[in-house]
Image (cartoon, rainbow, N blue to C red):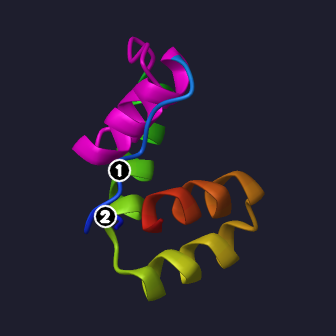
Amino acid sequence: KSRPERVLTPLNGVHRAVVMAIERGKLQNLIFDNQALFSHRALAALFGVILRLPPIKQAMASKQMKSRYLERLIEKMDA
């Protein structure tokens, strides 16, 4: 008999950090952890907004940016 909710066991420390960041909604801060530069702060804010959008708007943003990286981030957030 399986559990009603499956627990995702981290493979290693990096996987654990990424999963925790996704669960807490802080993935953009993990990616751009050195926010001393204005460009890093701006990109972290941009990713934060895009990752909080509804799925349809995320797809529209991803298509406009034509970014494989952003597509994978959105897929991971929705999973």
Residue 63's tag is: none
x then y, percent, for residue 7: 34, 48
Q: Quadrant of residue 5?
A: bottom left
The amino acid on which the numbered mark 2 sits, given as a three-letter code, is Arg
Q: Secondary structure at mark 2?
A: helix
Asked if residue 23 lies in the magenta stretch, the reply is yes
Question: Dot 2 surroundings within 10 Å: few (below 14), some, or many (20 or more)?
Answer: few
2 vs 16: above or below: below
x then y, percent, for residue 60: 56, 83
8 vs 31: above or below: below
Horizontal arrangement in the rendering, residue 51 relative to residue 74 (left or right):
left
Q: Which residue is mark 2?
A: 52
Asked if residue 17 lies in the magenta stretch, the reply is yes
Q: Identify the residue shown where x is 48% and y is 40%.
A: 43
For the residues marked 1 and 2, what is the alpha-carbon distance in whole angstroms? 6 Å
70 vs 60: above or below: above
x then y, percent, for residue 26: 30, 38
59 vs 43: above or below: below
x then y, percent, for residue 8: 42, 45
Q: Identify the residue shown where x is 53% and y is 63%.
A: 74
Question: Dot 1 surroundings within 10 Å: few (below 14), some, or many (20 or more)?
Answer: some
Q: Which residue is mark 1?
A: 48
Can you say which quadrant of the picture contains the N terminus?
bottom left
Horizontal arrangement in the rendering, residue 76 relative to residue 49 (left or right):
right
Q: State if disc 2 and disc 1 touch (CB < 8 Å).
A: yes
The amino acid on which the numbered mark 1 sits, given as a three-letter code, is Gly
